[in-house]
Amino acid sequence: MAVMEIKIDLSDIATAKEEAEILKRTLEDIVNLAKMANTLLSEQNTKPLSVVEAAKALGISRATIYREIERGKIKALTVGENSKRIEPIELERYKRNAV
């Protein structure tokens, strides 16, 4: 029976462990960044929009937005005396029904 000799360089194992640890920390950083991005996007999508922002989002004029608010086709919040804000979900509803 032949005996096989195996030589293992311990420095290779140490290097592999270090590389694995670096990869683990990098992946943890990527997951944390993805969570932060998701939070920012969800906060951005829930913030009420001004009439100007809503008009840009829909590709229509401010006057059209105001007209649609007056007609009851777009629901808007009144902020202060005259300022209007529109929830992003309301814009989505309007887009679906505008076709």
Image: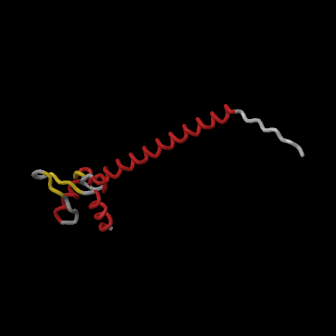
Instruction: In this rendered view, identify the residue nearer to me: 46 or 4.
Output: 4
Residue 24 image offset from top left, x and y in percent: 53, 42
Residue projecting furthest to the right: 1
Q: Give x and y (percent) for residue 4.
A: 83, 41
At x 41%, y 48%, the residue is 35
Location of the C terminus (image quadrant) = bottom left
Quarter-of-image position of residue 57: bottom left
Left or right, residue 7 beside residue 20: right
Residue 66: image quadrant is bottom left
- Look at 22% across and 53% down and name the residue there: 62
Q: In this view, does 80 lie to the left or right of 56?
A: left
Which residue: 15% across, 55% down? 78
Position of residue 97 measured from the top left corner of the image (x, y, whole percent): 30, 68
User: As rendered, which of 37 and 78 lies closer to the eye?
Assistant: 37
Q: In this view, does 39 lie above or below 71?
A: above
Query: Is residue 76 shown above or below 22?
Result: below
